[in-house]
Image: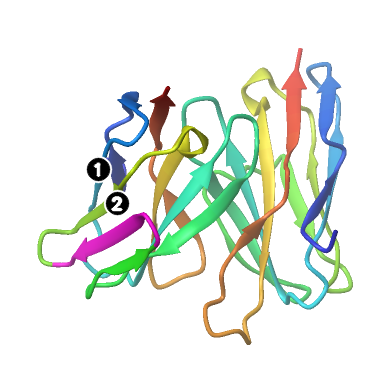
Amino acid sequence: DTGVSQNPRHKITKRGQNVTFRCDPISEHNRLYWYRQTLGQGPEFLTYFQNEAQLEKSRLLSDRFSAERPKGSFSTLEIQRTEQGDSAMYLCASSNRDSDTDTQYFGPGTRLTVL
Amino acid sequence: RKEVEQDPGPFNVPEGATVAFNCTYSNSASQSFFWYRQDCRKEPKLLMSVYSSGNEDGRFTAQLNRASQYISLLIRDSKLSDSATYLCVVQDSGYALNFGKGTSLLVTP
């Protein structure tokens, strides 16, 4: 399967702990995005990378959140000092800037539960 | 005010019915428009892009009215497998997709 992959698929943690999620985009895609989705809502944009450069960040991305894409391939999203309000599905998407449509393809997500 | 507004439903329709979803957006400068489909506990998947001229893909027809800032999706001859949440999506000048809350569709036998 050459789609977007995310690990882990599920994460349960205690409030105050740090968590890190990984996203592997489709191999030829140079753009990578992180979104967050809570129950009953559509996904909300968090941040965007073009290759290794983080070009856009949402106001939703507080200081406790950090994302990296060190070699322009996979990306990690770290949440420090987790809070119960961080419980959500964290979705990664990728796209190809050089394609006609630049369609964003989503991974299966990482479901985070903060106890 | 949320940028993309949708009726959350649920829409319960029998197999074979025609169902229409509507969506409005607030940013008149928005550039690209899509419908994504999301099955329960799965990731969103692109259903179709939406153009001012209207576009059709099999049983699905999407329409954009820029003057009214209104997007629609029509599903004809509904199948059980069409049951899902349909997300209206608007892209402004940046790269972020702005999603509506989604409209839930349940097609019953």
Tell me which corner region of the image, top left, top right, bottom left or bottom right, holds residue A62.
top right
Which residues make up the magenta segment? B58-66
Instruction: Please identify the quadrant where the C terminus of chain A is shown.
Output: top right
Instruction: Please identify the quadrant where the N terminus of chain A is shown.
Output: bottom right
Residue A7: percent from left, percent from top: 87, 43
Asked if the residue at tag 2 contacts the one at tag 1, i.e. Cβ–Cβ closer than 8 Å, the answer is yes
State whether residue B109 is above or below residue B92: above
Mark 1 lies on residue:
B20
Q: Is residue A32 left or right of residue B75?
A: right
Identify the element where label 1 is drawn: strand
Residue B18: percent from left, percent from top: 26, 40
- Residue shown at 34% from the left, 24% from the top: B10
Mark 2 lies on residue:
B73
Magenta stretch encompasses residue B106: no
- Residue shown at 42% from the left, 45% from the top: B87
Q: Amino acid at mark 1?
A: Ala
Q: Is residue B53 left or right of residue B50?
A: left
